Amino acid sequence: MTPVRWAALAALAGALYFAVQGGEYGTLDLRELRREAVRQEAEVARLQRVVDSLGRLAGAIERDPRMQERVARESFGMIRRGEFLFRIVPGEEAGPRLENGEGAR
């Protein structure tokens, strides 16, 4: 083979390699896009489950009196006549304090 043919063959091989591997959407980019599509589909499925769950919860809150009472009690601190509501404030130590700052034993 002449040097011109070798150069043409090398150029053709380089162009073929660039067509398969290089460019904006080469083989490696295609693989990454497929992996990303699988991740996105999994995220869509997860979010669909969340939406379904929230839809069931909203329906229960609209129709179920026990669920309405539960939400009222938990969210708004509502109580029935004759019940007592005890609020526990986190972060404060229980018990009386002595003058030196230590709790009573």
Image (cartoon, helix red, strand yellow):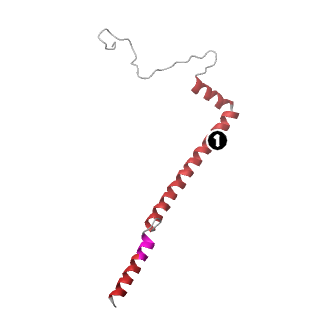
Q: Residue furthest left?
A: 100
Percent of width and height locating residue 31:
46, 64
Instruction: Report helix, strand or loop for mark 1.
Output: helix
Q: Residues within 10 Å of mark 1 (few under 14, many from 20)?
A: few
Q: Residue at x 56, y 47 (%)?
A: 47
Tell me which residue sits at (64%, 41%) in the image. 55
Seen from this angle, which residue lies furthest top?
A: 99
Nearer the observer, 15 or 71: 15
| Vertical side of 42 occupied by 64: above or below | above
Residue 21, compared with residue 49, is above or below; it is below
Q: Give the magenta range.
A: 15-21
| Residue at image point 43% right, 65% down | 28
Q: Where residue 61 appears, x then y in whole percent?
A: 66, 33
The residue at which mark 1 appears reads as 55
**What percent of the width, then of the height, locates residue 6?**
35, 85
Which one is nearer the viewer's eye here, 84 or 47?
A: 47
* Quarter residue 94 falls in: top left
